[in-house]
Amino acid sequence: MADKLNISSFLRNEKNETSLAKIALSLAIADDQIDSEITEHFKSLSYRCVITRAGGRGDNFTYKLFRNILAAAENAEVISRNPENEYTVYRSVQNVVTQITDSMENICGGGVKIGIASKGSHFAIALYGTVGIPGLNVDREILAMDVQYFSLKS
């Protein structure tokens, strides 16, 4: 059965269009050994994309997420360098942090793989990884994503 599945069908939304959110999610959850391959595949379909990682604890984690996502997106030319696009990244990071925040945020640490994708004026990020209390083996898997439509400027 698995050999009959077509991966592109999983990436389609209800309008039968390729979903930018699903591309970012695919980048975040892909096995580390195929990072280059999956990134190149989506680039061949005219998506701008990159994979990065971040880890930290408390407010430091949020700062590292923003810094790593912004730097990776600009360096890989997923977004153009300008204040409007930096604000788009800031809003996306703020939205995903809200999704993964809990009452133990200040003592929790985390490590995530981040998929970043854009096409035209649309921008998406997805995070996959773990958060927990360092040293106690109390980790939980997290998955969060955000899409900003009509937000990027060239």
Image: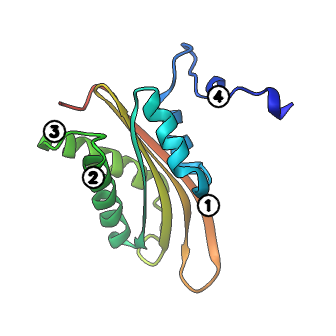
Look at the numbered disc 3 and give the secondary structure of its residue.
helix
From the image, state whether disc 3 or disc 4 is nearer to you: 4
Side (left or right) of 122 relative to 138: left
The residues tagged by marks 1 and 2 sit, at their Cα atoms, a distance apart of 23 Å
Q: Residue at x 40, y 55 (%)?
A: 97
Say which residue label 1 marks.
141
Say which residue label 3 marks.
84
Question: Is the residue marked by circle 3 packed among few (<14), some (14-19), or many (20+) residues within 10 Å?
Answer: some
Label drawn at residue 10: 4
Q: Residue at x 53, y 51 (%)?
A: 35
Vertical placement of 17 versus 79: above or below? above
Q: Earlier in the sequence, mark 2 or mark 4?
A: 4
The residue positioned farthest toward the right in the image shown:
1
What's the amino acid at mark 2? Leu
Q: Earlier in the sequence, mark 3 or mark 4?
A: 4
The residue positioned farthest toward the top in the image shown:
15
Side (left or right) of 145 relative to 32: left
What's the amino acid at mark 1? Glu
Q: Earlier in the sequence, mark 2 or mark 3?
A: 2
The residues tagged by marks 1 and 3 sit, at their Cα atoms, a distance apart of 32 Å
Look at the numbered disc 2 and give the secondary structure of its residue.
helix
Labels 1 & 3 near each other (Cβ < 8 A): no
Q: Position of residue 11 (x, y in %)?
A: 58, 28
Q: Position of residue 115 (x, y in %)?
A: 46, 47
Q: Earlier in the sequence, mark 1 or mark 2?
A: 2
Q: Position of residue 75 (x, y in %)?
A: 26, 51
From the image, state whether disc 1 or disc 2 is nearer to you: 2
Question: Is the residue marked by circle 2 packed among few (<14), some (14-19), or many (20+) residues within 10 Å?
Answer: many
